[in-house]
Amino acid sequence: MKTVLFLLGLFALAALGWMLFLPMLVERELRQVTGFDVRIEVLAANPFTGHVSVRGLRATNPPGYPSPDFVRLRELHADVNEYSWLFTDRLYIDDMFVDAEAVQIVRQHNGRSNAAELTAAFSGAPPGTAQGAKPVAPSKPLKFLIRTLRIRLDRLVIADYTLATPEVRTYNLNIDHSFTNISQAKQLLVPDVVRSLYSFGLRRDTEQLLPGDFGRALADAVGAAAHVGDKLKEAEHKTGQYLKGLLDKLEQSAKP
């Protein structure tokens, strides 16, 4: 019994140490890999079940950015199939919930954005790599499948400092959408989400702010929505003109 109690005490101490030091270890690793300052209020990960829970995550931009804010995350929950990553080339996530308060994409005067820099860091390029430097061979992209995904995003801020007069636009999107079987980021651009982005005035030049295929897909989707919107306005104008002409004719024919 004493041995059992001793082992239980060691296990409790190990679990307590895991909970206390895990957030600091993850913060340090993310700072070293990305160059962004990451702070996490609560981080819990169960190595036996694969359940991960994060609350109060905030990522700020590296020095040199005109605005520090990048990502404010209220919470994130995920049930990860750990063995899928060990024995296959794809990471499986059974269920995932992301609740983001705000995301601010900042484009510096030199044309680089924080979103592009973060993506480059995870692909193998060192943070803050100067333009014109020898390119770093990108690492193999992570394959993943999220069977059920729910995303909440309250606010998107786009700050463009490449212009003579910096432009900062805030979009109160209040997106709350559920997805299934997500294996590519561009699958998030479902019609409801694109309509929300377009209705708030998001422009096609977002391709310059967001890197890779997702930026191009978002630009194409917003551009297509703008084209459809212009066609609808043109059709409404023609319909209005037709009805006006018809009413004028009826009014003239009604006169004695």
Image (cartoon, rainbow, N blue to C red):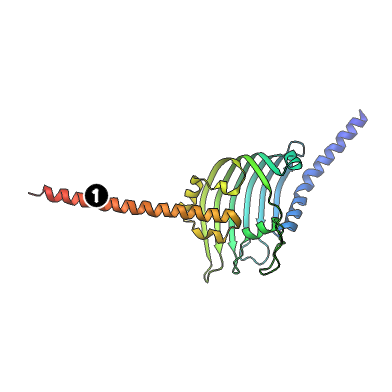
Q: Quadrant of residue 13?
A: top right
Percent x, y of residue 71: 62, 54
Q: Quadrant of residue 133?
A: bottom right
Outermost residue to the top: 1
Kindly state the secondary structure of the residue where label 1 is placed. helix
Q: Is residue 146 above or below residue 57?
A: above
Q: Residue at x 86, y 34 (%)?
A: 8
Outermost residue to the bottom: 164
Q: Amino acid at mark 1?
A: Leu
Q: In this rendering, would 101 be left or right of 224?
A: right
Q: Residue at x 63, y 59 (%)?
A: 116
- State the residue position of label 1: 243
Q: Is residue 60 visible?
A: no
Percent x, y of residue 32: 75, 58
Q: In this rendering, would 32 be left or right of 184?
A: right
Q: Is residue 118 above or below residue 20?
A: below
